[in-house]
Image (cartoon, grey):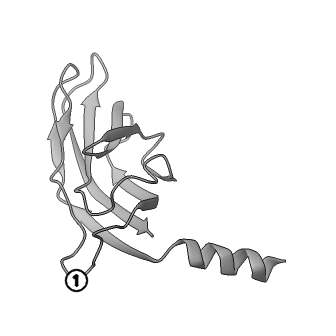
Amino acid sequence: MLTTLLMSSAQAATGSWSAQVPGLMVAMSDRASASQRVSPPAAVDLLSGQLGRIQWQFQHPPGALLNAWLCHPEQCVALTGMRGSTTALAGHTANAPLFFRFALRPGQRPVRVQGLQMIVNYQ
């Protein structure tokens, strides 16, 4: 049964790509700061592909309180921590750029967010 589960899982994800995103300074609570947008590498043909699971990671100083989102041009998804994975963007076009958004929680001092990474699975 485990073999069957692994085979069906492998068939569902037909590829993946990863990106490192430059860090950014987050200085406001009333306006989100967006990271650089990243797209699949040119060698990846995604004309009709759809997003699957996306894993993310970022870092900020201990004690900093931020709201964070992973965004596709059609939707943003709130992130629950500095690392994790989501299928909330599954089904959206896989060739669109993705990016992070961050906003300070009220009363917080500006924060540098770095180590931004994502691994995007598509089918």
Disc 1 marks which residue?
43
List x then y, in percent, for residue 112.
20, 43
- Count how many numbered circles sit on residues in the image: 1
Q: Residue furthest right?
A: 1
The residue at 28%/58% (across/down) is: 115
Viewer-side residue, 37 vs 114: 37
For the residue marked with disc 1, what is the amino acid? Ala
**In this view, 47 is above or below 26:** below
**In this view, 56 is above or below 26:** below
Badge 1: residue crowd in 10 Å (few <14, some 14–19, many ≥20): few
The residue at 39%/66% (across/down) is: 119
Viewer-side residue, 34 vs 15: 15
Give the position of the N terminus as an image quadrant. bottom right
Secondary structure state at the residue bearing disc 1 = loop
List x then y, in percent, for residue 49.
37, 67
The residue at 74%/74% (across/down) is: 5
List x then y, in percent, for residue 46.
30, 71
The residue at 25%/53% (across/down) is: 114
Quarter occupied by residue 60: top left
Indicate left or right for 8 with 61 as reference.
Answer: right
List x then y, in percent, for residue 37.
17, 54
Indicate left or right for 92 with 24 as reference.
Answer: right
**In this view, 40 is above or below 38:** below
Give the position of the C terminus as an image quadrant. bottom left
